[in-house]
């Protein structure tokens, strides 16, 4: 269990307490604890498991320490469950509206009795929000403008949350002797950036125990439906999960069908029909005769197709590649040799240069770039010229003292609102690796955003554009830009493009990453780690690259350092 997961629970607890109108000191204590936990460099779960005294951490008293141990041991917090029972999940969804925090939600829920986004929308339309003390017409209009988007986002969870839960359920069910096979299907298996619901398939000698076990899983809130072969549950995070029990001889066909996407399956059925075959979730049939179904490979083979990796099943290019015998050999996590975006205690990271380097080496990486923030990001203690030069000195010293990994002197340099860069060219010229990014002014008009990105691309010292659109999945739209124009300029100037692997960013999207690769732009998949745990997200970036159809060849940080360096623009 990760520190961020534990911290997230305490943040949630603080939000719920605030909505409930609890004592402000208590709320502040939980928020402080969440911050301490997420910036700790050691694993709290491990320390708790080893029986270490957690009150050694700043802001963690006896009671909080006990709750951390409780959560690590059981996956639940009694205090959180109590509040959840009082405050409906729809109330928490209101927090997704920009400019609406727990204080406002408390008024909506406790004063007006609103329980869902739909009820909040109705109240706005009736003018009831503008009438509230401390609110006005402007707030009401802002809510109305964003409430539909919030509802759409609320109904989906991130791929990281989806995977953690789905994989934990699958691991759990596989323990049962009655469960012969169990796998995740649906959008989660395709590694889409968000999932609307979770789909799990199993082959069982007796479905009963599997259904009982799922009902008791700590992530499950309630059972919505239980039949002979299908169970539907609501998870605590609000989304639903289907467990389907299928016959062994149909498992491959069911995996193929329920992995989707719908669009992919439409083409599969169409091709089957042309061969006089019928495909459904039970198998492939010629008349009454079942000719395939046990494995996915058989299902695809029976209609003349190679097995298609789930990440590609969106009816984009996968059928054309299959027809031409050119199914790409998708990049895998093991092929990544370097990580080129990360933070240390010099800006807003939790670990030192040395700790990051050792953790990276332990994970088998051959090189990293330390890329702390530039001065504009004062909230994150961004570096000015003087501190940066000193920081690079330290990086070089650490690099000399550690064997088995190369550390590049990098910087994550802000592209300012006026389209200039946050550090002078003379300083950037000294860097091994410059990531240029937008952090502020993301809501500027299209032309200004484009000018900022194009200026950055034209700067001879910029090596790569990081998290290009600035989107936060499910929370914040990216900036208003024409991605193809940015990519064409990047290609012209030899600038690389980042896939930021953090599951809340995954920026570039798979569509944009595919377009970049098509233009010959080297893609770099980076974690943007803010702690040693932060390296764990590399998998999500690799999955995004796989969805873009990328091979190791298309991803620059699969190269060894020497080859990687040869891809850098000479400046
Ligand atoms: P999601 O849950 O919105 O993130 O996306 P999926 O792809 O997991 O969609 P879901 O859960 O509705 O269904 C899982 C898969 O099952 C879907 O990708 C394809 C298949 N499927 C479900 N319903 C239908 C249907 O009505 N027609 C067809 N052709 N396939 C379906
Ligand atoms: Ca689904
Ligand atoms: Ca960053």
Image (spheres, rainbow, N blue to C red):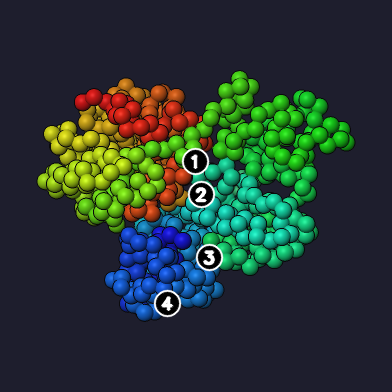
Contact, mark 2 vs mark 1 (Cβ under 8 Å): yes
Residue at (54%, 74%) from the top-left corner? 85
Q: What element carries label 1?
A: helix
View extreme (top): residue:
324
Is label 1's Cβ within 8 Å of ligand 1? Answer: no
Of 13 and 342, the residue lying toward us = 342
Q: Picture coordinates of residue 17 (x, y %)? A: 42, 73
Q: Mark 3 points at which residue?
A: 89
Q: Which marked residue is nearer to the observer: mark 3 or mark 1?
A: 1
Q: In this view, does 516 lie above or below 498?
A: above
How far is disc 4 from disc 2 in space, using C-alphas?
A: 30 Å
The answer to whether residue 293 is seen in the rendering is yes
Horizontally, is 557 left or right of 280 in the view? left
Q: Nearer the viewer, mark 3 or mark 4?
A: 4
Q: Name the residue under label 2.
A: 159
Determine the image quadrant of residue 414. Answer: top left
Q: In the rendered view, does 283 fall on the left or right side of 312? A: right
* Marks 4,2: beta carbons within 8 A: no
Task: Give the number of the disc on residue 543.
Answer: 1
């Amino acid at each position: 269990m990760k520190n961020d997961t534990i911290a997230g629970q305490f943040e949630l607890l603080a939000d719920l307490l605030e909505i409930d109108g609890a004592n402000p000191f208590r709320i502040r204590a939980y928020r402080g604890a969440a911050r301490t936990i997420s910036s700790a460099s050691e694993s709290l779960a491990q320390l708790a498991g080893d029986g270490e005294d957690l009150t050694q951490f700043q802001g963690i008293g006896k009671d909080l320490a006990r709750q951390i141990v409780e959560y690590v041991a059981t996956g639940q917090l009694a205090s959180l469950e109590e509040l959840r029972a009082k405050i409906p999940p729809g109330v928490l969804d209101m927090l997704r509206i920009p400019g609406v925090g727990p204080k406002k939600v408390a008024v909506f829920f406790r004063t007006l009795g609103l329980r869902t986004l739909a009820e909040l929308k109705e109240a706005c339309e009736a003018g009831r929000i503008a009438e509230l003390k401390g609110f006005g017409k402007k707030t009401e209009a802002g809510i109305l403008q964003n409430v539909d988007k919030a509802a759409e986002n609320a109904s989906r969870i991130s791929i990281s949350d989806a995977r953690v839960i789905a994989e934990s359920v699958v691991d759990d069910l596989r323990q049962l002797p009655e469960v012969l096979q169990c796998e995740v299907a649906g959008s989660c298996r395709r590694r889409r950036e968000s999932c609307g619901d979770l789909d799990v398939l199993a082959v069982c000698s007796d479905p009963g125990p599997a259904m009982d076990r799922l009902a008791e899983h700590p992530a499950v809130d309630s059972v919505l439906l239980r039949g002979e072969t299908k169970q539907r549950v609501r998870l605590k995070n609000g989304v639903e999960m289907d467990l389907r029990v299928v016959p062994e001889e149909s498992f491959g066909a069911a995996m193929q069908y329920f992995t989707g996407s719908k669009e992919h399956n439409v083409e599969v059925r169409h091709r089957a029909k042309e061969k006089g075959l019928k495909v459904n979730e039970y198998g492939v049939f010629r008349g009454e005769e079942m000719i395939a179904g046990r494995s996915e490979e058989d299902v695809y083979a029976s209609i003349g197709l190679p097995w298609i990796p789930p990440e590609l099943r969106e009816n984009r290019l996968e059928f054309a590649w299959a027809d031409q015998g050119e199914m790409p050999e998708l990049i895998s996590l093991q092929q990544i040799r370097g990580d080129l975006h990360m933070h240390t205690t010099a800006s807003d990271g939790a670990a030192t240069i040395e700790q990051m380097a050792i953790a990276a080496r332990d994970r088998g990486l051959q090189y990293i770039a330390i890329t702390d923030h530039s001065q504009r990001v004062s909230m994150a203690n961004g570096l000015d010229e003087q501190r940066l030069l000193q920081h690079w000195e330290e990086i070089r010293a650490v690099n000399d003292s550690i064997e088995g990994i190369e550390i590049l002197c990098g910087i994550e340099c802000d592209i300012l609102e006026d389209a200039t860069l946050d550090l002078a060219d003379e300083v950037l010229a000294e860097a091994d690796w410059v990531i240029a990014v937008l952090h502020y002014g993301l809501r500027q008009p299209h032309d200004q955003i484009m000018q900022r990105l194009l200026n950055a691309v034209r700067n001879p010292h910029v090596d790569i554009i990081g998290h290009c659109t600035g989107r936060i999945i499910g929370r914040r739209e990216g900036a208003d830009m024409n991605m193809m124009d940015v990519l064409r300029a990047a290609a012209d100037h030899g600038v690389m493009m980042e896939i930021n692997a953090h599951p809340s960013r995954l920026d570039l999207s798979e569509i944009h990453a595919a377009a970049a690769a098509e233009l010959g732009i080297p893609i770099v998949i980076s974690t943007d780690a803010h702690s040693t745990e932060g390296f764990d997200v590399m998998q999500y970036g690799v999955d995004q690259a796989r969805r873009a159809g990328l091979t190791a060849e298309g991803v620059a940080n699969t190269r060894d350092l020497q080859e990687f360096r040869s891809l850098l623009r000479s400046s």
